[in-house]
């Protein structure tokens, strides 16, 4: 049976309440068909890592104190969703990633410069940490899960910061690596892939949506669900525009246009992989899981135009 891909953004995994909802949603979906999870970094973490790069370069950062604070936040979440030995195992893995971040930030502080290869590795740590918490939380619910690093799945051209993806190679790697979907739920890091030499390369800010549709395309998924903190795609940013209206249905073309025009709920490059394979995208709200969301597919019902929604 074709799998379903569920992607959770930063606010959906960033605190215990929504994270518990996300874990339950995955457990429920898993009773219907195989599931792949794609997770972003905890809300705010990517921004904190960007700031840390700058202050390390300026000699103003204590790398050990910085990583200790990150460890504390992730451990608190672990204690909420995976208490006991499961959490302890994940804590060891958290420590390994954070030890590397500490070394990298220390080297930036020492040299006074940020190499692009180092920047991408530091920024990817947010997702490398969050998938450990998510996978432990699923296992605690009785759903066997494993954290999967997207460098094993997503092949890029190696351009740091905003790499282009080789979709054919990504398809091959993803199908091979995620071949045990019936047994275990992979929890894949959003936001990055691997360049030709295996180096971590980011897909650009907000790129986890694109990670999700790439994995969905590779696996011929039934659909991709993008779980965020708004009811779906609106006519404008609902946080700044009180008159913005929800768009319950969009064609791929319309969704791509809105994403490229700045509807941040979807990364600009996220619609294309799903559209090419005819895989519907359903944008939904972790903070209101019963809301209808926005359904994005090849065709709109007859007679519906995007302009109707803006009229
Ligand atoms: P996530 O961390 O879940 O990926 P993002 O912050 O990347 O979430 O995207 C969700 C945010 O996108 C919303 O909180 C909202 O403020 C913003 N946004 C901007 N434009 C739109 C739009 N047209 N429709 C919906 N959300 C939008
Ligand atoms: N964590 C990354 C960012 O903040 C990727 C994402 O959230 O999609 O840009
Ligand atoms: Mg986003």
Image (cartoon, grey):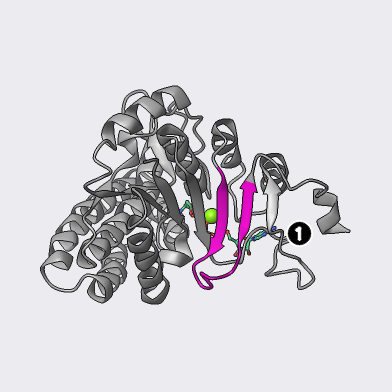
Q: Is residue 61 left or right of residue 89?
A: right
Q: What residue appears at the point 56 percent right and 42 percent down from the top-left corner? A: 270
Q: Residue 303: in sight, yes or no?
A: yes
Which residue is more in the foreground, 160 or 274?
Answer: 274
Q: Is residue 214 left or right of residue 144?
A: right
Res 64 → quadrant: bottom left
Which residue is more in the foreground, 60 or 22?
Answer: 22
Q: What residue appears at the point 47 percent right and 59 percent down from the top-left corner? A: 9
x and y percentages locating residue 173 in the rendered image: 33, 28
User: What residue would you read off at disc 1?
Assistant: 235
x and y percentages locating residue 306 in the rendered image: 80, 50
What is the span of residues highlighted in magenta in the rendered image? Answer: 280-296
- Can you say which quadrant of the picture contains the N terminus? top left
- How busy is the neighbourhood of tag 1: few (under 14 within 10 Å), some, or many (20 plus)? some
Q: What element carries label 1?
A: loop
Q: Is mark 1 within 8 Å of ligand 1?
A: yes
Which residue is more in the foreground, 18 or 175?
Answer: 175
């Amino acid at each position: 049976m074709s799998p379903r891909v569920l992607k959770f953004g930063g606010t959906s995994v960033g605190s215990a309440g929504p994270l518990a909802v996300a874990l339950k949603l995955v457990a429920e979906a898993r009773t219907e068909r195989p599931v792949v999870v794609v997770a972003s970094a905890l809300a705010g973490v990517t921004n904190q890592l960007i700031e840390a790069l700058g202050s390390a370069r300026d000699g103003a950062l204590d790398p050990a104190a910085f990583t200790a604070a990150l460890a504390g936040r992730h451990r608190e979440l672990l204690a909420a969703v995976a208490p006991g030995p499961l959490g302890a195992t994940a804590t060891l893995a958290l420590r390994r990633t954070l030890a590397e971040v500490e070394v990298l930030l220390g080297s930036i502080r020492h040299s006074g410069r940020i190499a692009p290869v180092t920047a991408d590795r530091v920024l990817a740590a947010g997702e490398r940490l969050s998938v450990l918490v998510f996978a432990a939380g699923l296992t605690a619910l009785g759903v066997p899960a494993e954290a999967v690093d997207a460098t094993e799945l997503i092949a890029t051209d190696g351009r740091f910061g905003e790499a282009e993806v080789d979709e054919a190679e990504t398809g091959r790697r993803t199908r091979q690596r995620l071949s045990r979907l019936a047994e275990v739920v992979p929890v894949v890091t959003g936001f990055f892939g691997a360049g030709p030499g295996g180096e971590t390369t980011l897909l650009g800010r907000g790129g986890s949506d694109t990670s999700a549709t790439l994995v969905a395309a590779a696996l011929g998924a039934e659909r991709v669900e993008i779980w965020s903190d708004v009811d779906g795609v609106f006519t404008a940013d609902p946080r700044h525009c009180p008159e913005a209206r929800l768009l319950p249905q969009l064609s791929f073309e319309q969704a791509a246009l809105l994403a490229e025009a700045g509807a941040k709920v979807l990364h600009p490059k996220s619609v294309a992989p799903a559209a090419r394979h005819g895989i519907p995208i359903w944008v939904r709200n972790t903070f209101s899981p019963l809301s209808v969301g926005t359904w994005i597919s090849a065709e709109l019902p007859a007679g519906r135009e995007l302009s109707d929604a803006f009229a």
